[in-house]
Image (tube, helix red, strand yellow):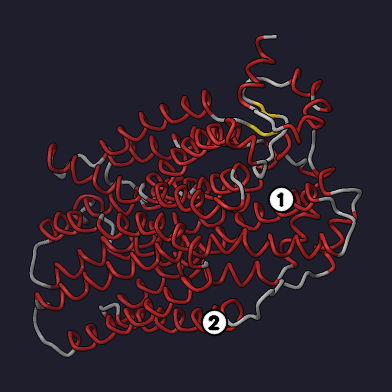
Amino acid sequence: MEQQMLLQREEPLSNSGQAQHNSDTSARRRSSSRHISHWDAEDVAAWEAGNKVIARRNLFWSVVTVHLGYSVWTLWPVLVLFMPQSVYGFSAGDKFMLDTVATLVGACTRLPYSLATTIFGGRNWAIFSVTALLVPTIGTLVLLTHPGLPLWPYLVCAALTGLGGGNFAASMSNANAFYPHRLKGSALGIAGGVGNLGVPTIQLVGLLIIAVFGDGKPYLVCGLYAVLLVGGAIGVTLFMNNVEQHRVKANRLRPIISAVVSIRDTWLLSLLYLGTFGSFIGFSFAFGQVLQTNFVAAGQSTAQAAVHAAELAFLGPLLAALARVYGGRLADRLGGSRLTLAVFVAMALVAGLLIGAGSLEDRHAGPMRGASMAGYFVCFIALFILSGLGNGSVYKMIPTIFEACSRELHLGSDLSEAERRDWSRLISGVAIGLVASLGAFGGVGINLALRESYVATGAATDAFWIFMLFYAGAAALTWKVYVRRPVGYIPALPPAAVELVAQPAVVELVGR
């Protein structure tokens, strides 16, 4: 009886949901206080009666997991600044490779992590994903205390830190499931933005440890985060929920994935996110090394350049993360497509300014001038802020577009309103994971382009040309497909997406 009362406090239902409540009584009795049988985010009465408290609590701990995940994912860009070649034997190219491997693995894990949430439950997967990050964190601590080892164990550890990148997709899928459509932009913006703050946070932690203990003990960063990960795992275990209604049996995922990949908008949104999030994570990994290289070119010693780069590198990711929160809210008001268009136009212009500044500096003999350094820094900060706004606006577009798709299905089939919402939630949840995964590959491209540009010319100007052309193309795509579309436009659905509905009922995909 006590357990049932716990569930009833956590699952307030409106009068309209009483029938569902009665039908789920036996399921509720079998559930624990951390497992919710039925969840309807669009039920306004239930939302105001207490469901919003449950949603906010789950959002908070989802944000904790993604925040810690981002910090561990971007651990190496902080550490490489304080790994002199004379001690560890790694060149600048080797350090860029560590960053690239971490970015690549983070991109590859995002889709399976988002699917794992639907299979195992948001709470269960959050516990696993946070705990798993202890392996690379402790492994990195061991490596840093034993300099002189070959590159490959460092690459393995960097690859494992990439698991932190997968936490983002899992967290966003979970937030998407708990919140009503009218609040998804804000919820996803908060989850993404505060989660993204993990990048500047670990950079500030590294800077603080250097200020207190000197630049010879970067491994203390790993020790601190090992403790934080344990605390995060405990919090997730105690305060998050699984929603049984949102779980899908593994053997029923194939039609859902087929439907998602068959919709053209999935790939177009992935391309847009490749530009916004790819820029954010790529520049977050590379910004410190770019600053350090430029400081050395300006005549500073390697040690001085490392400290000065660390003092400034956190500002870009910090402002981008804050901009993402605002970008989600602004997209709720103005529309995600319009804001995305403005972002890409501005990013193309800023990349053009970097090309101009780089070309002028390339013609100048001698150390880099202070004015050029200031120009580089301001332009990079602008790119960070714009990418943060774009991250929020593109993520607002995803549920909006698939909501429109579901309404087309509703008109052309016997789907009930509840089944239509289930279809929209399932499809948009998987789409979020796929878009997040493909978007992260943009970070790999950013790092590879910068690495090759520095190796070939000793400067980043060639890479900026590539970035500018991509941003301009993304702006043109957004304008043509999403901004100029006629009023009442509904994305066309391919047969695979329609066939998903033909399977007895969308809700039967849920394994309960």
Q: Is residue 325 above or below residue 53?
A: below
Q: Residue at x 25, y 78 (%)?
A: 458
**What residue occupies the far bottom of the structure in this picture?**
363
Q: Residue at x 37, y 84 (%)?
A: 465
Is residue 153 visible from the viewing direction of this image? Answer: no
Q: Residue at x 44, y 49 (%)?
A: 190
Q: How many marks?
A: 2
Q: Nearer the viewer, residue 152 or 434?
A: 434
Q: Provide residue 469's location: percent of width, then percent of height.
A: 44, 84
Q: Provide residue 441's location: percent of width, then percent of height.
A: 51, 64
Under mark 1, the amino acid is Leu
For mark 1, give the secondary structure.
helix
Quarter the C terminus occupies: top right
Q: Is residue 358 left or right of residue 491?
A: left
Q: Is residue 384 left or right of residue 45?
A: left
Residue neighbourhood size for the residue with mark 1, other residues' Cα within 10 Å, grouped as few (<14), some (14–19), many (≥20): many
Q: CA distance from mark 1 to mark 2?
A: 28 Å
Q: Tell us which disc is closer to us: 1 or 2.
A: 2
Under mark 2, the amino acid is Trp
| Residue under numbered circle 1 | 426
Q: Nearer the viewer, residue 354 or 339?
A: 339
| Residue under numbered circle 2 | 479
For mark 2, give the secondary structure.
helix
Q: Residue at x 81, y 55 (%)?
A: 255
Residue 295: image quadrant is bottom left
Q: Nearer the viewer, residue 3 or 229?
A: 3
